[in-house]
Protein backbone atom coordinates (compact mmCIF):
# COMPACT_ATOMS: atom_id res chain seq x y z
CA UNK A 1 0.00 0.00 0.00
CA UNK A 2 1.07 3.55 -0.69
CA UNK A 3 1.36 5.79 2.37
CA UNK A 4 1.88 9.54 2.57
CA UNK A 5 4.60 11.34 4.52
CA UNK A 6 5.30 15.01 5.04
CA UNK A 7 8.54 15.18 3.03
CA UNK A 8 8.55 18.56 1.31
CA UNK A 9 11.66 19.55 3.27
CA UNK A 10 13.48 16.24 2.88
CA UNK A 11 16.64 15.88 0.84
CA UNK A 12 17.18 13.13 -1.70
CA UNK A 13 19.46 11.24 0.69
CA UNK A 14 16.66 11.29 3.28
CA UNK A 15 14.02 10.29 0.76
CA UNK A 16 15.82 7.12 -0.34
CA UNK A 17 15.87 5.90 3.27
CA UNK A 18 12.08 5.73 3.33
CA UNK A 19 10.25 2.45 2.76
CA UNK A 20 9.42 1.47 -0.78
CA UNK A 21 5.84 2.36 -1.61
CA UNK A 22 6.04 5.63 0.31
CA UNK A 23 4.58 8.64 -1.47
CA UNK A 24 7.25 11.36 -1.50
CA UNK A 25 7.91 14.89 -2.68
CA UNK A 26 11.40 16.17 -3.40
CA UNK A 27 13.16 18.96 -5.27
CA UNK A 28 16.32 18.68 -7.33
CA UNK A 29 18.19 19.81 -10.41
CA UNK A 30 17.94 17.93 -13.70
CA UNK A 31 21.37 16.44 -14.46
CA UNK A 32 20.25 14.07 -17.24
CA UNK A 33 17.10 14.89 -19.21
CA UNK A 34 14.43 12.44 -20.42
CA UNK A 35 15.48 10.65 -23.66
CA UNK A 36 19.16 11.08 -22.80
CA UNK A 37 19.82 7.78 -21.03
CA UNK A 38 16.32 6.41 -21.52
CA UNK A 39 12.84 7.37 -22.71
CA UNK A 40 11.35 6.26 -19.41
CA UNK A 41 13.56 8.00 -16.84
CA UNK A 42 15.81 10.96 -16.06
CA UNK A 43 17.91 12.04 -13.09
CA UNK A 44 17.83 14.87 -10.58
CA UNK A 45 20.24 15.72 -7.78
CA UNK A 46 20.63 18.02 -4.79
CA UNK A 47 23.52 18.66 -2.41
CA UNK A 48 22.95 15.30 -0.70
CA UNK A 49 22.71 12.94 -3.67
CA UNK A 50 20.74 12.03 -6.78
CA UNK A 51 17.83 9.83 -7.83
CA UNK A 52 16.15 8.47 -10.93
CA UNK A 53 12.67 9.73 -11.86
CA UNK A 54 10.71 7.02 -13.69
CA UNK A 55 7.52 6.96 -15.77
CA UNK A 56 6.22 3.72 -17.26
CA UNK A 57 4.15 5.87 -19.65
CA UNK A 58 7.26 7.88 -20.68
CA UNK A 59 5.17 10.94 -19.85
CA UNK A 60 7.32 13.91 -18.86
CA UNK A 61 7.06 17.68 -19.29
CA UNK A 62 9.64 19.36 -21.52
CA UNK A 63 12.78 19.47 -19.38
CA UNK A 64 16.29 20.72 -19.97
CA UNK A 65 19.61 20.40 -18.19
CA UNK A 66 19.71 22.59 -15.07
CA UNK A 67 15.94 22.84 -14.54
CA UNK A 68 15.11 22.80 -10.84
CA UNK A 69 12.02 20.61 -10.42
CA UNK A 70 9.69 19.47 -7.69
CA UNK A 71 8.68 15.83 -8.12
CA UNK A 72 5.83 13.94 -6.46
CA UNK A 73 5.61 10.20 -6.76
CA UNK A 74 6.12 6.81 -5.12
CA UNK A 75 9.51 5.59 -3.93
CA UNK A 76 10.57 2.31 -5.51
CA UNK A 77 13.68 0.39 -6.49
CA UNK A 78 14.92 -1.34 -9.61
CA UNK A 79 18.06 -3.49 -9.75
CA UNK A 80 19.27 -2.07 -6.40
CA UNK A 81 18.78 1.51 -7.62
CA UNK A 82 16.22 3.75 -5.85
CA UNK A 83 13.83 5.75 -8.00
CA UNK A 84 10.64 7.76 -7.81
CA UNK A 85 7.76 6.56 -9.97
CA UNK A 86 5.41 9.24 -11.25
CA UNK A 87 1.93 8.76 -12.73
CA UNK A 88 1.77 11.68 -15.12
CA UNK A 89 3.71 14.70 -16.39
CA UNK A 90 1.86 17.00 -13.98
CA UNK A 91 3.65 15.27 -11.08
CA UNK A 92 6.67 17.35 -12.08
CA UNK A 93 6.81 21.14 -11.69
CA UNK A 94 9.68 23.37 -12.86
CA UNK A 95 10.46 25.83 -10.07
CA UNK A 96 13.80 27.31 -11.14
CA UNK A 97 16.95 27.06 -13.20
CA UNK A 98 20.68 26.76 -12.47
CA UNK A 99 23.89 25.86 -14.25
CA UNK A 100 24.98 22.25 -13.90
CA UNK A 101 28.64 21.95 -13.00
CA UNK A 102 30.66 18.84 -13.72
CA UNK A 103 32.40 17.66 -10.58
CA UNK A 104 36.18 17.72 -10.36
CA UNK A 105 37.75 14.34 -11.18
CA UNK A 106 37.82 12.07 -8.15
CA UNK A 107 39.79 8.94 -7.35
CA UNK A 108 37.91 5.79 -8.30
CA UNK A 109 38.48 4.38 -4.82
CA UNK A 110 36.62 7.42 -3.42
CA UNK A 111 33.91 7.40 -6.10
CA UNK A 112 32.66 4.00 -5.00
CA UNK A 113 31.78 5.47 -1.59
CA UNK A 114 29.90 8.46 -3.00
CA UNK A 115 26.07 8.75 -3.12
CA UNK A 116 24.48 7.09 -6.15
CA UNK A 117 22.70 9.16 -8.79
CA UNK A 118 25.10 12.10 -8.71
CA UNK A 119 27.16 13.61 -11.52
CA UNK A 120 30.84 12.71 -11.19
CA UNK A 121 34.04 12.71 -13.25
CA UNK A 122 36.74 10.07 -13.37
CA UNK A 123 40.00 9.73 -15.26
CA UNK A 124 42.23 6.74 -15.88
CA UNK A 125 43.71 4.22 -18.26
CA UNK A 126 41.42 2.00 -20.32
CA UNK A 127 41.95 -1.58 -19.16
CA UNK A 128 39.15 -3.29 -21.07
CA UNK A 129 36.88 -2.48 -24.04
CA UNK A 130 33.50 -3.97 -24.91
CA UNK A 131 30.51 -3.28 -27.14
CA UNK A 132 28.73 -1.57 -24.22
CA UNK A 133 31.57 0.51 -22.84
CA UNK A 134 34.90 0.12 -21.09
CA UNK A 135 36.70 -0.24 -17.78
CA UNK A 136 39.12 2.43 -16.56
CA UNK A 137 41.75 2.30 -13.81
CA UNK A 138 43.45 5.27 -12.13
CA UNK A 139 45.72 3.26 -9.86
CA UNK A 140 43.31 3.42 -6.91
CA UNK A 141 40.70 1.11 -8.44
CA UNK A 142 38.73 0.11 -11.51
CA UNK A 143 35.38 1.51 -12.68
CA UNK A 144 32.90 0.41 -15.33
CA UNK A 145 31.85 2.98 -17.95
CA UNK A 146 28.52 1.95 -19.46
CA UNK A 147 27.58 3.68 -22.73
CA UNK A 148 23.87 3.55 -23.52
CA UNK A 149 22.91 3.46 -27.24
CA UNK A 150 20.50 6.39 -26.74
CA UNK A 151 23.46 8.74 -26.05
CA UNK A 152 24.90 8.29 -29.58
CA UNK A 153 28.39 8.21 -28.06
CA UNK A 154 30.96 6.58 -30.35
CA UNK A 155 33.03 3.87 -28.67
CA UNK A 156 36.55 4.84 -29.77
CA UNK A 157 38.01 2.54 -27.19
CA UNK A 158 41.64 1.40 -27.21
CA UNK A 159 43.28 -0.36 -24.29
CA UNK A 160 45.96 1.58 -22.39
CA UNK A 161 44.65 4.91 -23.74
CA UNK A 162 43.96 7.63 -21.18
CA UNK A 163 40.37 8.83 -20.92
CA UNK A 164 38.33 11.30 -18.88
CA UNK A 165 34.66 10.47 -18.27
CA UNK A 166 31.79 12.49 -16.80
CA UNK A 167 28.44 10.90 -16.06
CA UNK A 168 25.84 9.55 -13.64
CA UNK A 169 27.10 7.33 -10.85
CA UNK A 170 24.79 4.32 -10.59
CA UNK A 171 24.79 0.80 -9.21
CA UNK A 172 23.17 -2.39 -10.50
CA UNK A 173 23.61 -6.12 -10.00
CA UNK A 174 27.03 -5.94 -11.66
CA UNK A 175 28.31 -3.19 -9.36
CA UNK A 176 29.13 0.51 -9.49
CA UNK A 177 29.32 2.20 -12.89
CA UNK A 178 29.31 5.59 -14.55
CA UNK A 179 26.86 6.49 -17.33
CA UNK A 180 28.07 9.27 -19.67
CA UNK A 181 25.23 11.35 -21.11
CA UNK A 182 26.63 13.08 -24.20
CA UNK A 183 29.58 12.62 -26.61
CA UNK A 184 31.39 15.49 -24.83
CA UNK A 185 31.29 13.50 -21.58
CA UNK A 186 34.12 11.28 -22.86
CA UNK A 187 37.51 12.81 -23.70
CA UNK A 188 40.23 10.51 -24.96
CA UNK A 189 43.86 11.40 -24.24
CA UNK A 190 45.16 14.02 -21.84
CA UNK A 191 42.98 17.07 -21.25
CA UNK A 192 44.47 20.26 -22.72
CA UNK A 193 44.39 22.12 -19.41
CA UNK A 194 46.19 19.32 -17.66
CA UNK A 195 48.83 19.10 -20.41
CA UNK A 196 49.48 22.82 -20.11
CA UNK A 197 49.73 22.57 -16.34
CA UNK A 198 52.20 19.69 -16.62
CA UNK A 199 54.27 21.65 -19.14
CA UNK A 200 54.20 24.73 -16.91
CA UNK A 201 55.18 22.64 -13.92
CA UNK A 202 58.09 21.03 -15.78
CA UNK A 203 59.31 24.43 -16.91
CA UNK A 204 59.12 25.91 -13.43
CA UNK A 205 60.90 22.95 -11.82
CA UNK A 206 64.66 23.50 -11.44
CA UNK A 207 66.73 20.44 -12.23
CA UNK A 208 69.35 19.52 -9.57
CA UNK A 209 72.10 19.65 -12.25
CA UNK A 210 71.58 23.41 -12.47
CA UNK A 211 72.40 23.76 -8.79
CA UNK A 212 75.61 21.77 -9.29
CA UNK A 213 76.67 23.89 -12.28
CA UNK A 214 75.86 27.07 -10.39
CA UNK A 215 77.99 25.88 -7.46
CA UNK A 216 80.94 25.10 -9.75
CA UNK A 217 80.71 28.54 -11.36
CA UNK A 218 80.67 30.23 -7.94
CA UNK A 219 83.72 28.24 -6.81
CA UNK A 220 85.63 29.12 -9.99
CA UNK A 221 84.77 32.80 -9.64
CA UNK A 222 85.86 32.88 -6.01
CA UNK A 223 89.09 31.04 -6.87
CA UNK A 224 89.90 33.43 -9.72
CA UNK A 225 89.22 36.45 -7.55
CA UNK A 226 91.50 35.05 -4.84
CA UNK A 227 94.29 34.35 -7.38
CA UNK A 228 94.01 37.86 -8.82
CA UNK A 229 94.10 39.29 -5.32
CA UNK A 230 97.25 37.33 -4.42
CA UNK A 231 98.93 38.30 -7.69
CA UNK A 232 98.07 41.94 -7.15
CA UNK A 233 99.30 41.81 -3.55
CA UNK A 234 102.56 40.18 -4.68
CA UNK A 235 103.16 42.93 -7.24
CA UNK A 236 103.16 45.54 -4.45
CA UNK A 237 105.81 43.73 -2.45
CA UNK A 238 109.38 45.24 -2.66
Image (cartoon, rainbow, N blue to C red):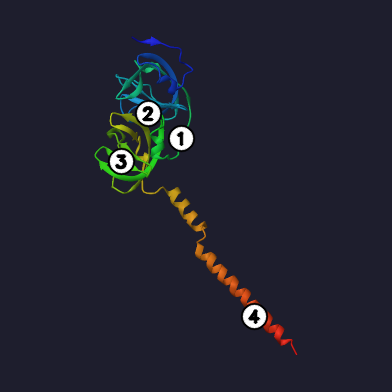
- Front-lying residue, 168 or 222: 222
Q: Which mark is residue 101?
A: 1
Mark 3 neighbour density, 10 Å: few (under 14) some (14–19) many (20 or more): many
- Spatial separation of the CA atoms under disc 4 and disc 2: 80 Å
- Spatial separation of the CA atoms under disc 2 and disc 1: 15 Å
The residue that label 3 is drawn on is 135
**Which of the marked residues, 4 or 2, is nearer the chain's N terminus?**
2
How many labels, in total? 4
Q: Nearer the viewer, mark 3 or mark 4?
A: 4
- Spatial separation of the CA atoms under disc 3 and disc 1: 24 Å
The residue that label 2 is drawn on is 33
Quarter of the figure with residue 176: top left
Picture coordinates of residue 228, whole percent (x, y): 66, 81
Q: Nearer the viewer, mark 3 or mark 2?
A: 3
Instruction: Look at the image and tell me in which quarter the C terminus lies.
Output: bottom right
Picture coordinates of residue 126, whole percent (x, y): 31, 45
**Which of the marked residues, 1 or 4, is nearer the chain's N terminus?**
1
Q: On the rendered structure, is 159 left or right of 197?
A: left
Does residue 93 show up? no
- Spatial separation of the CA atoms under disc 3 and disc 4: 68 Å
Question: Among all residues in the image, which is located at the extreme right?
Answer: 238
Q: Which mark is residue 227?
A: 4
Picture coordinates of residue 18, whole percent (x, y): 40, 17
- Spatial separation of the CA atoms under disc 3 and disc 2: 25 Å
Q: Nearer the viewer, mark 4 or mark 2?
A: 4
Picture coordinates of residue 92, whole percent (x, y): 40, 19
Q: Nearer the viewer, mark 3 or mark 1?
A: 3
Name the residue located 48 percent from the left edge and 56 percent from the top edge: 202
Amino acid sequence: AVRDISSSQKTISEIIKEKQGTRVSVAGTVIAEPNTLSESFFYISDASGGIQIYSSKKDFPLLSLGDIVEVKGVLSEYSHEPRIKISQASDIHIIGKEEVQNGAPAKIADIKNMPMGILISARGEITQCSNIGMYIDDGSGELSVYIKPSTNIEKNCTQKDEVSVTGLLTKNDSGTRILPRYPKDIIYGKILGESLEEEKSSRSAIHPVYFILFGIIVILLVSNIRILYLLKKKSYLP
